[in-house]
Amino acid sequence: MKNYILIFIFLLFSKFLLAQSYVPFQFGNTRWMYYEMKMFSTKSFCYFSFDTSGYYHNGNKFWKIEYVLNPTYSPSNIYRYIYDDTISRKIYTIDTISNTTFLLYDFSANVGDTINSIYNVGYLDTVVVDSINYISVNTILRKHIYVHSKNNVNLSKTWIEGIGSTYELFYPSIHLPDPVFELICQEYNTFINFGTNLGCSNFITTTQNYNILDNQIVISFNPEINSIHIENPNALSYSFYIYDLSGKIIEQLLSAREIENINIGHITDVVVLYNLNVKNSINQKGKIIKY
């Protein structure tokens, strides 16, 4: 009897998953925020969907997605177009010169499927679906498809309905180990669909050079021993916070010493965010690149 009950529950659960409604992309006031990490440099950037006129092909509206090196929108001459076919549950991009369309995502895919036509900015990739799950992301139940590229079977990424790839919007799967991309935040009408309040607000758009802060505090990093070095010659009282990429505080230091060394060898993230506060005067945010 127990076996019959378990089978019934399994079938009911399977039917529930199959019946899940599709969560489409949202365009018109959308922002995707990414880190791009190379061996010796790091930058961050955003994609914006602000333009509402779009580009039409075969009666389908492709939305303009602009590449901006800033957390706030400004018109850009670097852009691509996206169309969400909500019936087939597939996302396309288009070459507006030749009117050739390319598949970016296939949210109708099933476990074990091989997709031979995923467009990874300039080349077609073969992607294998490893597993599928339905997860609530900031109160919205979204289909998560876990894929790997046949070009690099050891590196996998997640496609999330209505959001895109956790790697990069126009690089749905990982082709090469360098550079490394990471989705930090995705918002529509300022509602966070992916990421945290802290992650979205603590967004950095330039490579941190660890410059002198008001000629008072110097922050440097020694990658050989994974140590952050803080020089505070005026013995100012300050607080120093270290975050992971999800925005979680993983280290906190309150100090007025002239020299501090913080070992971050135990932190697994390649990029570590920090925030330094000096009472009533200074606030500095930055990032550490671990090699």
Image (cartoon, rainbow, N blue to C red):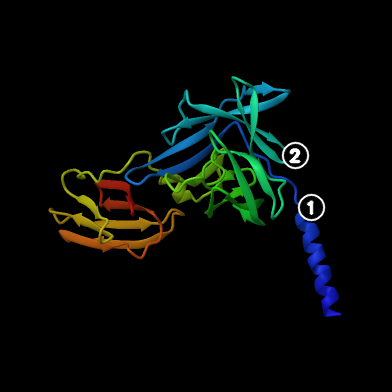
The x and y percentages for residue 7 are: 82, 70
Horizontal and vertical percent for residue 115? 66, 45
Q: Give the number of the disc on residue 88.
A: 2
> Looking at the image, which is closer to me, 180 or 63?
180
Q: Do we see residue 140 in this rendering?
A: no
Query: At 53% from the left edge and 33% from the top edge, which residue is drawn?
Result: 122
Of the residues shown, which amino acid type is indicated by label 1?
A: Ala
How much space separates mark 2 and mark 1, taking CA atoms?
15 Å
Q: Is residue 53 left or right of residue 203?
A: right
Residue 271 at x, y = what percent?
A: 38, 52
Bin the neighbour count of mark 1 within 10 Å (Cα to Cα): few under 14, some 14-19, many 20 and up: few
Element type at mark 2: loop
Give whichever of 278, 77 is nearer the camera: 77
Q: Residue furthest bottom?
A: 1
Q: Going from the N terminus, do you reach mark 2 or mark 1 first?
A: 1
Q: Residue furthest front?
A: 151
Residue 233 visible? The answer is yes
Residue 204 falls in which quadrant of the image? top left
Residue visible at 65% across and 46% down in the picture: 161
Query: In this figure, which residue is indicated by the disc labeled 1?
Result: 19
Which quadrant is the N terminus positioned in? Answer: bottom right
**Label at residue 53:** none
Q: Check disc 2 and give the amino acid type.
A: Ser
